[in-house]
Amino acid sequence: MTTLALWTATVSSRIERCDLALSMARRYLAETGDAPGAPTGGRSDLVAASLVLARCAAWDEALDLARRLELENPDAAELGKNIAWARGVAAEDHASVEGALRLSRSRTLLLQRGRAFAALVPFRNELVADQQGAVFFARAAWAAGEDEAARQALGAHMSEPDVAPLLANWSRELGR
C-alpha cells in the first residue's frame, strides 16, 4: 500500500492534483519512516518523493529530502541543485520568452513535460519563427505528447522526409 501511495503521488503531481499528491507523498514518507529527520538510503523512491514535493511547490520539504539523500549518496547532489534552481525560477517573471524558457527548463528538470510545454505555448510564434527555436518548441511538444504541435513547428522549416527521422529519434529518447 505504501508503494501505491507513492505512485498515486507521482501521477497526481504530474497532472497538477497537488492536494492529493502532497497528501500521498507525505503518507508514503511517514509510513516508510522516511519523513524529515529520518535516515535515507539513497533510494530511487525517495528521489521520486522529492520530485513530487518539488512539482507541488513544497520546496522546503523537497530540498530537505534531497539534501538527506545527498548526505548518504553524494551522486544525488544534482537533485538538490535542480530543485533549488527550480524554486528560484518559480519566483521569477515568466512574461517574456526568456522567462518562459527558464520556466520550461525548470519544469523539465522536475519531469513535468506537459507543464514545460505549456510555458512555451504563449511564445509559439516567436519561437517557431527561428529554426532552432522551432526545433526546441517541437521537442517540448513531442515530449508532452502534443504531436500535432510538434509536427507543425518542424514543418515550418523542414520537409516531411526530414521531420520523420527526428520524431523517431525523440520517441526513442523519450521511451514512447
Image (tube, grey):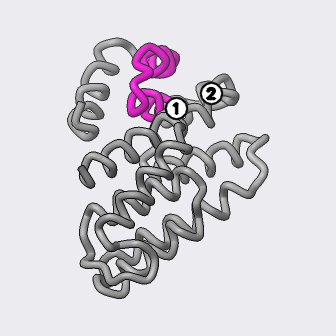
Which is more toward the observer, 160 or 36?
36
Task: Give the amino acid at mark 2.
Answer: Val
**Residue 158 can be seen in this image:** no
**Would you identify the image quadrant in which residue 148 lies?**
top left
Regarding mark 2 in the picture, which secondary structure is present there?
A: helix
- Residue name at image x 48 percent, y 34 percent: 15
Magenta-colored segment: predominant secondary structure: helix
Q: Which residue is mark 1?
A: 137
Crowding at dot 2, Cα within 10 Å, few <14 / some 14-19 / many 20+, comes out as: some
How many numbered marks have been drawn onto this rendered protein structure?
2
Q: Which residue is mark 2?
A: 121
Task: Give the amino acid at mark 1.
Answer: Phe
Crowding at dot 1, Cα within 10 Å, few <14 / some 14-19 / many 20+, comes out as: many
Does the magenta segment cover residue 12? Answer: no
Give the number of the mark in front: 1 or 2.
2
**Residue 78 can be seen in this image:** yes
On screen, 55 above or below 36? above
Which is more toward the observer, 35 or 132?
35
Which label belongs to residue 59?
Answer: none
- Residue name at image x 34 percent, y 20 percent: 163
The C terminus - image quarter = top left
Residue 138 place in picture, x, y as percent:
46, 28
On screen, 146 above or below 130? above
Farthest bottom residue in view: 71
Q: Earlier in the sequence, mark 1 or mark 2?
A: 2
Q: Is residue 41 left or right of residue 57?
A: left
Residue 113 place in picture, x, y as percent:
45, 39
The span shown in magenta is: 137-157
- Residue name at image x 28 percent, y 61 percent: 45
Regarding mark 1 in the picture, which secondary structure is present there?
A: helix
Residue 153 place in picture, x, y as percent:
51, 20
